[in-house]
Amino acid sequence: MHHPPVEKLVTERFRSLNASDCPPEIYSWLVEPSSMTARLSAHCQKLEVAVLREGFITYQDFTPDERHAWGEGDNQRRFWLREVQLVAEGEPWLVGRTVIPETTLQGPEAALMALGNRPLGHHLFQSTSLSRDYLTAGTVCGLWARRSMLRLSQKPLLLTEIFLPASPLYSLSAKGPSLCNP
Ligand code: PHB
């Protein structure tokens, strides 16, 4: 199964879907309320985080979807971008892209800039202040995906996760989403 290179994939349009558009065994993955790292770990010996990109960006660097999610804003505002792959025994299973407004990074959330190879979920799910505005199931370029607007102590961050063809989701159902041309 071919897909566009990761740098392109993360900029492709997110198409949301409803439970009725998706096999139930897949939907349960897409709306998993707890740690995706933990759920994927149950399907392999070793799951590692490989950081692809980390650093500050501005509104100009947003994908069209992110502009929509964050709305028009001050062009000077900075956001911390973290792009990772979850790799199971050498095979990339998931791409994660997190966009965090600089104002979210105050206090204990400054640790989000220093995660390195530790999964984001470790910080999120040990926090007592985690809440979620929405969690949307969907596809990106024909791959299963999901997008969540999370909050830590009321401060927002946007997480997009794209499941790559080697991940266990694609062996659960014969009816996968159709892939677009790379
Ligand atoms: C991350 O560490 O940034 C990360 C890990 C697992 C995910 C998404 C993001 O599912």
Image (cartoon, rainbow, N blue to C red):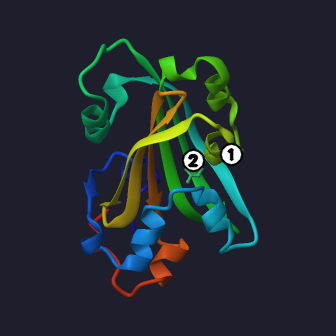
Q: Is mark 1 within 8 Å of ligand 1?
A: no
Tell me: 163 left or right of 141.
right
Residue 29 image point, x, y percent = 48, 68
Residue at position x 64%, y 46% in the image: 125
At label 1, counting other C-alpha atoms closer than 10 Å, the crowd grade (few under 14, some 14-19, many 20 or more) is few
Dot 2: element = strand
Three-letter residue code for mark 2: Val
Residue to which mark 2 is pinned: 84
Figure label count: 2
Q: Measure the alpha-carbon separation of dots 1 and 2.
A: 14 Å
Three-letter residue code for mark 1: His
User: Residue most toward the right?
Assistant: 45
Q: Earlier in the sequence, mark 1 or mark 2?
A: 2
Residue 126 image point, x, y percent = 69, 42
> Looking at the image, which is closer to me, 8 or 20?
20
Give the answer, above or below, for where 1 lies relative to 86: below
Q: Residue 122 bears which disc, if any?
A: 1
> Looking at the image, which is closer to me, 132 or 172?
132
> Looking at the image, which is closer to me, 148 or 165?
148
Tell me: 142 left or right of 97.
left
Tell me: 70 left or right of 97.
left
Q: Is mark 2 within 8 Å of ligand 1?
A: yes
Residue at position x 36%, y 12% in the image: 76
